Amino acid sequence: MIKLSELFEEYMLELQARGVAKSTYTNYSRYIDRFIQMVGDKDIEKVINRDVKLYIKQMQTENFKSKTINLALTSIKSMFNYAVEEEYLGLNPIHQKKVK
């Protein structure tokens, strides 16, 4: 089993290898790290969509704009898509739609 922090580290290396823009890398790093801090460094198989809903709710409570919340959501979904590509998971557990 792989922990969220391990997936995060590997995914950030992947983004560097892909040559994503520095701003994209920085934003993804920030929002994924916040997510891990909130849900804890658990096995990726134990992450559920409810975890993301709680994260979104927390961001809304802190008065983040919808655009920022959607960027955070995109970054988390993208990391889990990577986990599926690398066959760490069979399916992406994150099904949350963007916020309005």
Image: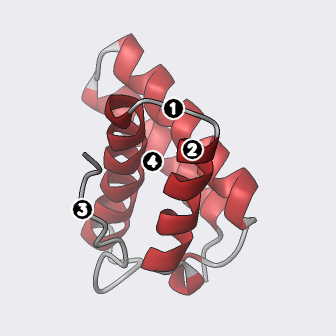
Mark drawn on residue 64 = 1
> Where is residue 84, by image quadrant?
bottom left
User: How many other residues sit within 10 Å of disc 1, few (<14), some (14-19) or many (≥20)?
Assistant: few
Mark drawn on residue 59 = 2
What amino acid type should be assigned to the residue bearing mark 3? Lys
Q: Nearer the viewer, residue 5 or 27?
A: 27
Circle nearer the viewer, 4 or 2:
2
Return the disc, 4 or 2, that comes first in the chain's sequence: 4
What amino acid type should be assigned to the residue bearing mark 2? Met
What amino acid type should be assigned to the residue bearing mark 1? Phe
Q: Secondary structure at mark 2?
A: helix
Q: Secondary structure at mark 4?
A: helix
The residue at 64%/79% (across/down) is 43
Q: Position of residue 95 (x, y in %)?
A: 28, 72
Q: Are marks 3 and 4 in contact (CB under 8 Å)?
A: no
Mark drawn on residue 11 = 4
Q: Is residue 9 visible?
A: no
Q: Secondary structure at mark 1?
A: loop
Q: Are marks 1 and 2 in contact (CB under 8 Å)?
A: yes
Please indicate whether residue 41 sits to the left or right of residue 45 in the image.
right
Circle nearer the viewer, 3 or 4:
3
User: How many other residues sit within 10 Å of disc 4, few (<14), some (14-19) or many (≥20)?
Assistant: some
Q: Nearer the viewer, residue 100 or 24?
A: 100
Return the disc, 3 or 1, that comes first in the chain's sequence: 1
Which residue is tagged 3?
97
The residue at 30%/15% (across/down) is 21
Q: In the rendered view of the protein, which quadrant contains the C terminus? A: top left
